[in-house]
Image (cartoon, rainbow, N blue to C red):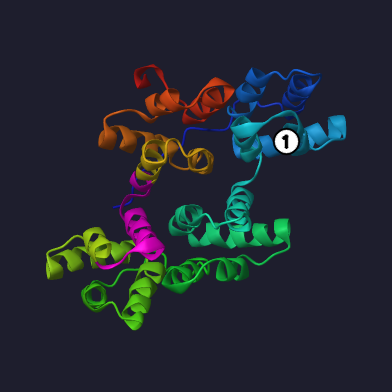
């Protein structure tokens, strides 16, 4: 049940933040900009090391590294390099803020982040959001979304999922509730459905989904797809997929971002950066198993220039991936 997962970015050995800061300073000087040097340093250090480089950069040059990257770089390459500089909770907060403050709300970003993060990650993300934007994440979600989609997001953002707890007797009961919710679809049933999916532990939900299959003869995801629609349905499915196999969920999200949306840059960048030290190597494996082509190959096909180089470096592709 517990998946062994692996990232693609690890702490660099013999790490010297001052030397890295000076190399970056050199790369960012003058008119041109040594983008290869930026890629070589920033994608080959873990997040904690990058934060130390930013501190060293500040003390050597008296300037903010993120500010300099924003000023000197442009387009998607800038988004990647700047994204790598945020601590994970701040990066999630940054992505959520931008998903909500534009002209329209980018619901898929809210789904990707809130359906997949642990209680601890959600707690830190809320804190970071408040610090960075002097705003309350719950209130912003409340004002930018609506209906049962909103109720489910509001439940997830509280970060109150049970951890590790299982009760087989209760699993059969919960499965019955889910089955009824798929039959009757009243407001009350939708609320019960999302309460179970947002608050029970992953281990408990595994049991619930097995019981659901026994009772209904149907897979949980198929049942949700059949009974509900819109962002509410997408969010529920995302939660179920994350419970079952989080790397497989992200492989699916990457595949659809690349193939169904003609390379949806924001989604690809966000997933690669956010999962790079958690499970990106495992996501690559799932991608290959499920879709026959490697993630490396698909990125090569759709992206170009230094942007492509940076994404491939985060993917940590190897020769057999071509």
From the image, give the main secondary structure of the stretch colored magenta. Answer: helix
Q: Residue at x 26, y 59 (%)?
A: 221
Boundaries of the magenta span: 227-249
How crowded pointer 1 is (Cα within 10 Å; few <14, some 14-19, many 20+) is rated as some
Dividing the picture into quarters, in which one does residue 96 lie?
bottom right
Quarter of the image where one finds residue 104: bottom right
The spot of residue 58 in percent (x, y) is 82, 36
Q: Residue at x 33, y 73 (%)?
A: 193
What is the x, y in percent for residue 113? 49, 54
Can residue 234 be seen?
Answer: yes
Q: Quadrant of residue 129?
A: bottom right
Of all residues, the one furthest to the front in this rendering is: 103
Relative to 281, residue 172 above or below: below
Does 189 sit above or below residue 104? Answer: below
Left or right of 167: which side holds 37? right
Residue 317 at x, y percent in the picture: 43, 24
Q: How many labels sit on residues?
A: 1
Is 115 within the magenta?
no
Q: Which residue is mark 1?
A: 70
Q: Is residue 261 left or right of residue 80?
A: left
Q: Is residue 26 above or below residue 49?
A: above
Which residue lies most toward the bottom here?
188
Locate the C terminus and report the quarter of the image it occupies. top left
* Residue 124 left/right relative to 166: right
- Identified at 52% across, 25% down, the residue is 308
Q: Is residue 233 magenta?
A: yes
Residue 282 at least partly seen: no
> On the rendered structure, is 315 left or right of 55?
left
């Amino acid at each position: 049940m517990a998946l062994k997962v692996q990232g693609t970015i690890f702490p660099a050995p013999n790490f010297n933040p001052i030397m890295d800061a000076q190399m970056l300073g050199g790369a960012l000087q003058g008119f041109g900009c040594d983008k290869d040097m930026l890629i070589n340093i920033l994608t080959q250090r873990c997040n904690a090391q990058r934060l130390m480089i930013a501190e060293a950069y500040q003390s050597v040059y008296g300037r903010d590294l993120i500010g300099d990257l924003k000023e000197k770089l442009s387009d998607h390459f800038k988004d990647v390099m700047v994204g790598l500089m945020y601590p994970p909770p701040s990066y999630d907060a940054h992505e959520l803020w931008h998903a909500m403050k534009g002209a329209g709300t980018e619901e898929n970003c809210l789904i990707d982040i809130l359906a997949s993060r642990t209680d601890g990650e959600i707690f830190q993300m809320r804190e970071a959001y408040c610090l960075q934007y002097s705003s309350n994440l719950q209130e912003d979600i409340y004002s930018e979304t609506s209906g049962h989609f909103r109720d489910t997001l509001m439940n997830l953002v509280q970060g109150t999922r049970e951890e590790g707890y299982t009760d087989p007797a209760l699993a059969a009961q919960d499965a019955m509730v889910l089955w009824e919710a798929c039959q009757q679809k009243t407001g009350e049933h939708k609320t019960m459905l999302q309460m179970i999916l947002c608050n029970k532990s992953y281990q408990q939900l595994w049991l619930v989904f097995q019981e659901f299959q026994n009772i209904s003869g149907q897979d949980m995801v198929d049942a949700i797809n059949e009974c509900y629609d819109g962002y509410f349905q997408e969010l529920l499915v995302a939660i179920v997929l994350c419970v079952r196999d989080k790397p497989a969920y992200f492989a699916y999200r990457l595949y659809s971002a690349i193939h169904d949306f003609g390379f949806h840059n924001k989604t690809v960048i966000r997933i690669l950066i956010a999962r790079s030290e958690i499970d990106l190597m495992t996501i690559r494996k799932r991608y290959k198993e499920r879709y026959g082509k490697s993630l490396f190959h698909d990125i090569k096909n759709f992206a170009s220039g230094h942007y492509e180089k940076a994404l491939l470096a985060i993917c940590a592709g190897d020769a057999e991936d071509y």
